[in-house]
Amino acid sequence: MARILIVEDNEMNTDILARTLARADHLLLTAADGEAGLALALAEQPDLILMDIGLPGIDGLEVTRRLKAAPATRQIPVLAVTAYAMAGDRELCLAAGCEDYISKPFDADQVVEKVARLLARRQRLADLLGRQQGDDPPG
């Protein structure tokens, strides 16, 4: 069970994402703007962040840049979930530090699949780093 932070200013989108991910047995945290999302990510260290880009205050691209610049949060995968779906928007999200991108309106199955893939990738990296540091692999 992963802890996932949803940073989204639209309550309906937050509700849909939360219900979708709760069915996949994830624990959810939510924030309605960039400042709250940044603070919650730093305080709670979630396993994954779903980041809206068009947020009030600090936009999702800047929040992601700040998260990726901070040693405590740089390893947390960020999945952009955004209405920005024009040519080049995906590249902007990836350049800011997002590991993947989904455009709105989103398909719930696609969200679940991308979340699972990013969480598995994070676990593989953690296992690899643990072995490199001489830790025993999890049994």
Image (cartoon, rainbow, N blue to C red):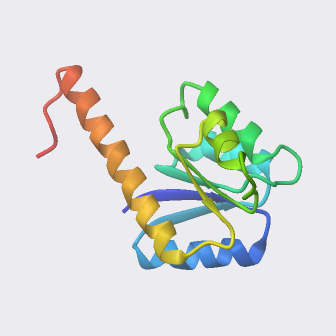
Q: In this view, does 12 lie above or below 112?
A: below
Q: Of residues 94 and 34, which is closer to you in this image? A: 94
Q: What residue appears at the point 16 percent right and 42 percent down from the top-left corner?
A: 138
Percent x, y of residue 106? 61, 72
Q: In this view, does 1 lie above or below 122?
A: below
In the figure, residue 16 lies in which quadrant?
bottom right
Q: What residue appears at the point 60 percent right and 36 percent down from the top-left corner?
A: 97
Percent x, y of residue 78? 56, 47
**Side (left or right) of 93 relative to 47:** right
For the view shown, which residue lies furthest in the front direction?
A: 87
In the figure, residue 82 lies in which quadrant?
bottom right
The number of callouts visible is 0
Percent x, y of residue 15? 66, 77
Q: What residue appears at the point 78 percent right and 48 percent down from the top-left corner?
A: 34
Percent x, y of residue 59? 81, 46
Q: What residue appears at the point 69 percent right and 68 percent down from the top-left corner?
A: 104
